[in-house]
């Protein structure tokens, strides 16, 4: 449960990383959370939590944000997000208001004692 509230989220499996990724907006278009887990039921950890993603602030709505599996690179580190936002805040920053929007994401893995070395 998120005390900031959430919009419907999107979950995708990243086969190269063997992790599930969950994306959801909280209130405004710039309030985005990205989470990961080894299984769809968790446990979920925070990858990133933004209050002003894309310089869009909190005025308006973050409607959807997803990483389509076909747009994830073979190594799992480069992903493309499709997102939709609406309202006055969405007209600011990256000006994504009521449009088809794509954003490229590049992941950097943190070393972990339980992660296998390549």
Image (cartoon, rainbow, N blue to C red):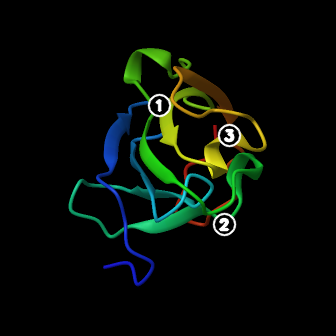
> Foreground: 7 or 90?
90
* In the image, residue 52 above or below residue 14: below
Q: Which of the two discs, 3 and 1, labels the residue nearer the N terminus?
A: 1
Q: Tell me, yes or no, whether the two marked residues, 2 and 3, touch with CB atoms within 8 Å.
A: no
Look at discs 2 and 3 and give the one toward the viewer: 3
- Residue plotted at (41% across, 15% down): 70
Q: Quadrant of the N terminus?
A: bottom left
The extreme bottom residue here reads 3
Look at discs 1 and 2 and give the one toward the viewer: 2
Of helix, strand and loop, which one carries label 1?
loop
Mark sitting on residue 51:
2
Q: Position of residue 103 (x, y in %)?
A: 64, 28
Query: On the image, which quarter does residue 2 sit in?
Result: bottom left
Q: Quadrant of the C terminus?
A: top right
Alpha carbon separation for disc pair 2 and 3:
16 Å
Q: Tell me, yes or no, whether the two marked residues, 1 and 2, touch with CB atoms within 8 Å.
A: no
């Amino acid at each position: 449960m998120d005390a900031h509230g959430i919009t419907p989220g999107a979950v995708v499996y990243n086969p190269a990383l063997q992790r599930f990724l969950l994306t959801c907006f909280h209130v405004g278009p710039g309030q985005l959370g990205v989470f990961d887990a080894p299984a769809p039921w968790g446990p979920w950890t925070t990858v990133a939590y933004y209050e002003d993603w894309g310089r869009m602030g909190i005025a308006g709505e973050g409607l959807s944000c997803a990483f389509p599996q076909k747009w994830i690179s073979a190594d799992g580190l480069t992903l493309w997000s499709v997102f939709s936002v609406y309202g006055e805040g969405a007209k600011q920053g990256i000006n994504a208001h009521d449009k088809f929007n794509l954003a490229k994401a590049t992941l950097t893995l943190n070393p972990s004692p339980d992660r296998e070395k390549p």
